[in-house]
Image (tube, rainbow, N blue to C red):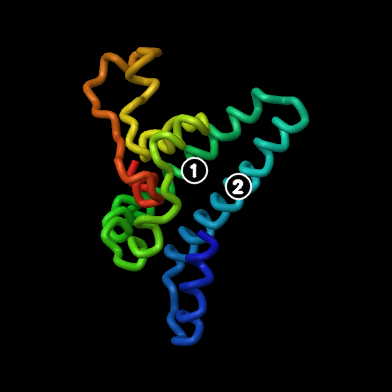
Amino acid sequence: MFTEAITINGPEQLGNIQVPKRASYIRVIMLELSRIASHLLWLGPFMADIGAQTPFFYIFRERELIYDLFEAATGVAEYQKLITRNPIFLERVEGIGIIGQDEALNWGLSGPMLRASGIEWDLRKVDHYESYDEFDRQVQWQREGDSLARYLV
């Protein structure tokens, strides 16, 4: 949210644009939530580094709640539409950083890194832990092994 605030404040000041009080209040709330999320990102790993694992998980849970608010306020689904077919984005990630199947296995990759390298394997489907086997879902995977494939997965 800080980047957006800086980006919009400059033109508003240059154009002498008066922002409604309500919008200003919403911005302050979002900026403070952003600040809290940033501090939580520091605090969680710091606590883990000093041997306190449990707070790490609680802290990240709280951070996710803040991110849920950001998604609702910013329309994050729209970002996907803007990014996925953006020619500049595609030029920078398509065919870049390719990791083939053999490398992925030899390096012990897992999760999206493994599935983006053409291996249709998901622990949630294979191990049947929790209640994942009760959901009809497809394993998301790509063959290309590049940065675009990792983004898509």
In the image as oriented, which residue stretches furthest toward the bottom?
15
Work out whether residue 79 or residue 15 is closer to the camera in this orientation and state it.
79
Cβ–Cβ under 8 Å for marks 2 and 1: yes
Residue 98 is left or right of residue 87, and the answer is right
Residue 27 is left or right of residue 49, and the answer is left
Real-space CA distance between mark 2 and mark 1, rounded to the nearest whole angstrom: 9 Å
Mark 2 lies on a secondary structure that is: helix
Work out whether residue 63 or residue 152 is closer to the camera in this orientation and state it.
152
Q: Quadrant of the C terminus?
A: top left
- Residue at image point 61% right, 49% down: 38
Q: Amino acid at mark 1?
A: Ile
Residue 25's tag is none
The residue to which callout 2 is attached is 36
- State whether residue 60 is above or below residue 39: above
- State whether residue 137 is above or below residue 18: above
The residue to which callout 1 is attached is 66
Q: Position of residue 66 (x, y in %)?
A: 49, 43
Q: Position of residue 84 (x, y in %)?
A: 29, 56
The 10 Å Cα crowd at callout 1, few under 14, some 14 to 19, many 20 or more, is some
